[in-house]
Image (spheres, rainbow, N blue to C red):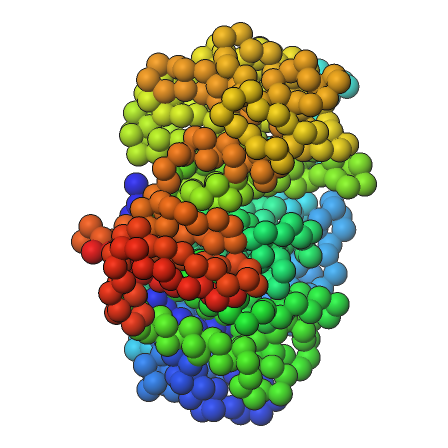
Amino acid sequence: MTTPLPHAPRGILFGAAYYAEYHRDDRTTTDLDLMKDAGFTVIRVGESVWSTWEPRDGEFDLEWLLPVLDGAHERGISVILGTPTYAVPPWLQQAHPEIAAETRTGHPVPWGSRQEVDYSHPAFRFHAERVIRAVIARYADHPAVIGYQVDNEPGLLLFHNHGVFQGFIRHLKATYGDVETLNREWGLTYWSHRLADWSELWAPDGNSLPQYDLAWRRYQSQLTTDFIAWQADIVREYAREGQFVTTCLAYARPAVDDEAVVRALDVTAGNPYYAMQDHLDATLDCEPVTPWTTTGVAALFRQADRIYSSKQARFLVTETDAQSIGGSELNLPPYPGQLAQAALALISRGAAMIEYWHWHTLPYGTETYWGGVLPHSLRPGRVYREIAGLGATLAAIGNALDGFEPDADVAMIWSNDSRYALEFFPPLADADGGPDRQSYQRIFDAFHRGVIDGGAQARVLHADQALSLGAQALAARFPVLIAPGFYAASDADLDLLRDYAHSGGHLVIGIRTGYGDEEARARTEVAPARLAEAAGVSYEEFSNLSAEVPVRGTGVFPGADATARLWVDGLIPSGAEPLAEYDHRRFGDFAAVTTHPHGGGRITVVGTVPSPALAADLVRWAVPAPIADELAPDRTLPVTVSSGALPDGGRAWFVFNWGWEPQTVTLAASVSDAVSGEILADGTDVSLPAWSTRAFLMR
């Protein structure tokens, strides 16, 4: 399943985004010397400053970056060169105001931030191509350049521009053929929306129909995919053999289908941001601090697993926390040790590069309080010293992780279509009782956290990737498969899940799986559709929960702390064995969790959003002997273990203490310390101070 990282250098790349042009004084020599001393092997440059590359229309200044590239090369530091298309210069906005993105029809986004343009517009494409060609042609042959990042975190906006809407209509014509087919597939008889002609299709601003919205979201994601592929093709005209092309993805962007967009790229790159301090205590539950940063240890691992999922291959981290990340009101610098922990957590799930955002904290601009490796004083401090320590650790590990493939006890199905559909029609409510647009992520994360808290490891598979494997191969490779919130699922998708169980796998499904079809229409059959008979259970009613409901086991699990959250499917067994029930006057009439043999495997149905305790108990039952038990079978939170296979048949292990209290782990196998080379025999007690990580190799 895993493919090697294309054009991969040996070892783990380590560095930061670097903008010498953002300094008020020239510090290039000083900065690069400090980077070398910290063990940096890579920097990312050039992607944010179109107005520096092209200060006036058609007038290019290309030489300002040369001292940075020359200085980096002299110090053995590689360079990833960016194209600057995500931040347009003032002259372009003034010359072509029609390129401004519209987030409502006829209402352009005011200029003054970034990513305000419709990148499908021909005028924008003309100027973007010109600057791309100028920059890449100038520096493609520079020996420091190992790869290219095209654009930056694409897919921020849903474009409502006239040209985009006309393209959407052409897309619908190609997809559905005629309006009668569209009327039937979208159910446009409802509320008198039937079309007599394509010209009658209404603009998306007032749309209330979920089928329209899903098609609109798919089309917007295709615009992003086309834009990135277009840039990648241009860059490849100049790239040398061995140089890679990527873009950095922010996975929560509304107009990104990550699995589709990376098909045109050599390697996946992502920007996992996370809240630090107590948010990385594995024994605590903390509320998110921003919509785009995760909270919790499991969510950090989930970000890595999602980046890996895009290509089912190792990936690059192009941006992640160095200090506090966010506005001036959000100041959560890492506790000592957390930077190394987070970096090694990402590496343990497949990262082949760690780059920080960014080298120095800016004295001006929107991101004045987005902390870099250096503070505002520009003097190396505690964060620099910790990052330098990590650099030394990675240098000592060297190329030992080349060919590394992260382990997986459990596979989890991810569906971007379901994310889109459940953002429009969320099943869950937020704390204020309104629709929770993060419903899909919340459902998915509940089960993923259960994997981590339950001592196991996850591999995330896109639905199409699972289909391409087929039921038998999927069951042979992944003995447990979890499909939470798989709402926008085709008949083929659901048949694959059923056949996976028949082929010997243990299928676990969560709420909303098997309820909708590929058009996000509610299926007119017994739920969970195409799975009910095989699962030996069905339901016809469901309810939101305003408070947690205790869940009691009927035998093997769960423990006393397990609860149901946010939702109840009224599960009615018809042959399935109830594993858990609700302690509730009404919902006690239904099962909370059931299981049923099917063919050579079984299907377990979870009728709620499981609490961390319930989810962890479920995973411990489904995965009684996770891979991590081979090293540390007696571990408990806040200790977690992550691992992966090496090409020579060995294994790399990462042991984390996510908390303040020192921990001790007794090894169940002989290993060598990946940093010092020390041999540790079976039965050795390994001390884990607060917020610490140990890496081991087993040959």
Residue in front for this viewpoint, 634 or 282: 634
What residue do we see at 62% from left, 57% from top? 279
Residue in front for this viewpoint, 652 or 521: 652
Asked whether the viewer can see residue 576, the reply is yes
Asked whether the viewer can see residue 51, the reply is no
Residue 50 occupies quadrant: bottom right
Instruction: Please say if 117 is above or below 92.
Output: above
| Residue 490: % across, % down | 49, 23
Q: From the image, which quarter does the C terminus lie in?
A: bottom left
Q: Residue furthest right?
A: 432
Residue 194 occupies quadrant: top right
Residue 553 occupies quadrant: top right
| Residue 532: % across, % down | 51, 13
Residue in front for this viewpoint, 535 or 469: 535
Horizontal side of residue 634 vs 446, given as left or right: left
Instruction: Please say if 66 is above or below 346.
Output: below
What residue do we see at 65% from left, 32% from top? 563
What residue do we see at 53% from left, 43% from top? 449
Q: Residue furthest top?
A: 574
Instruction: Please say if 595 is above or below 372.
Output: above
Instruction: Please say if 329 is above or below 170.
Output: below
Q: From the image, which quarter does the N terminus lie in?
A: top left
Horizontal side of residue 698 vs 694, given as left or right: left
What residue do we see at 66% from left, 67% from top? 332
| Residue 527: % across, % down | 57, 15
| Residue 364: % across, % down | 68, 79
Q: Residue furthest left?
A: 648
Residue in front for this viewpoint, 77 or 35: 35
